[in-house]
Image (cartoon, rainbow, N blue to C red):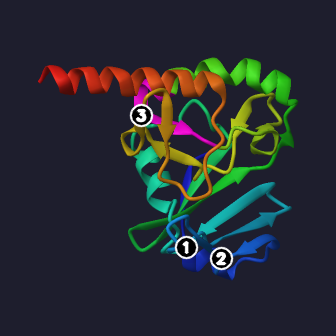
């Protein structure tokens, strides 16, 4: 079940508010302010979660770009809908699930995650227990889907990966190794050109 829904329809629905950070602003290391506004609503009856972004949310475009290249196709079977405001993507809908056993999740999902990183040049930087769920059919799924970043936004200095994100992503070692490899290969190709 994949569907699109307009934000105006979401606003009319009766939901439980899970998290309301629509006006959240974060100070960066450079002392700039970035919008990190988003809200999460739960539809208990249909076992769905609606995550709505502030139009200025710094990670909204990351989600949109990753969606376009198919990043979520194999990693997020919980993703069942996209929220629009007119033609603009403003969030997404996921099915509910239970928090996964993290040891099992790391084992089962890391291989797929590494493949998807190589295929799409995006990586998931918040690979933590709270962001992996098990659906009713037993499939594991990433949630908190805006926690992606295109590898093209990263730099490699020596062996250190430099991130533009002010909060700083949490990248597991296998992802970091893949990202380093892609960045090193890219710099070799650029040097040859």
The image quarter containing residue 106 is top right
Q: Quadrant of the N terminus?
A: top right
Residue 168 located left or right of residue 190: right
| Closer to us: 147 or 158 | 158
- For mark 3, what is the residue? 156
- For mark 1, what is the residue? 35
> Residue 81: horizontal and vertical position, in percent?
58, 54
Magenta-highlighted residues: 117-125
Q: Residue at x 55, y 67 (%)?
A: 28
- For mark 2, what is the residue? 24
* Other-residue count near label 3 (Cα within 10 Å), few / some / many at <14 / 14–19 / ≥20: some
Query: In front: mark 3 or mark 2?
Result: 3
Q: At numbered mark 1, what does the secondary structure look like: helix, strand or loop?
A: strand
Q: Is residue 22 above or below residue 163?
A: below
Q: Which mark is residue 23?
A: none
* Other-residue count near label 2 (Cα within 10 Å), few / some / many at <14 / 14–19 / ≥20: some
Query: Between marks 1 and 3, how big is the CA–CA gap?
Result: 26 Å
For the residues labelled 2 and 1, say whether their Cβ atoms are less than 8 Å apart. yes
Check if residue 120 falls in the magenta segment: yes
Tell me if I can see residue 72 in this picture. no
| Closer to us: 130 or 43 | 130
Query: Between marks 3 and 2, how big is the CA–CA gap?
Result: 30 Å
Q: At numbered mark 2, what does the secondary structure look like: helix, strand or loop?
A: loop
| Closer to us: 32 or 9 | 32
For the residues labelled 1 and 3, say whether their Cβ atoms are less than 8 Å apart. no
Tell me if I can see residue 163 in this picture. yes
| Closer to us: 64 or 5 | 64
> Residue 171: horizontal and vertical position, in percent?
63, 35
């Amino acid at each position: 079940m994949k569907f699109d829904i307009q934000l105006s329809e979401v606003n009319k629905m009766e939901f439980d508010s899970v998290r309301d950070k629509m006006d959240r602003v974060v100070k960066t290391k450079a002392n700039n302010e970035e919008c990190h506004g988003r809200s999460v609503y739960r539809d208990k009856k249909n076992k769905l979660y609606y995550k709505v972004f502030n139009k200025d949310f710094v990670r909204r475009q990351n989600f949109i770009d990753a969606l376009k290249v198919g990043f979520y196709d194999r990693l997020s079977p919980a993703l069942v809908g996209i929220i629009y405001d007119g033609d603009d993507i403003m969030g997404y809908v996921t099915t509910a699930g239970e928090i996964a056993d993290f040891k099992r999740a790391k084992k089962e999902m890391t291989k797929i995650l590494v493949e998807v990183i190589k295929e799409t040049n995006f990586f998931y930087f918040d690979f933590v227990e709270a962001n992996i769920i098990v659906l009713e059919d037993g499939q594991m799924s990433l949630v908190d889907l805006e926690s992606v970043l295109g590898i093209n936004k990263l730099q490699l200095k020596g062996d250190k990966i430099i991130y533009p994100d002010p909060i700083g992503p949490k990248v597991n070692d296998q992802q970091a190794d893949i990202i380093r490899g892609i960045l090193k290969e890219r710099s070799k190709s650029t040097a040859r050109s």
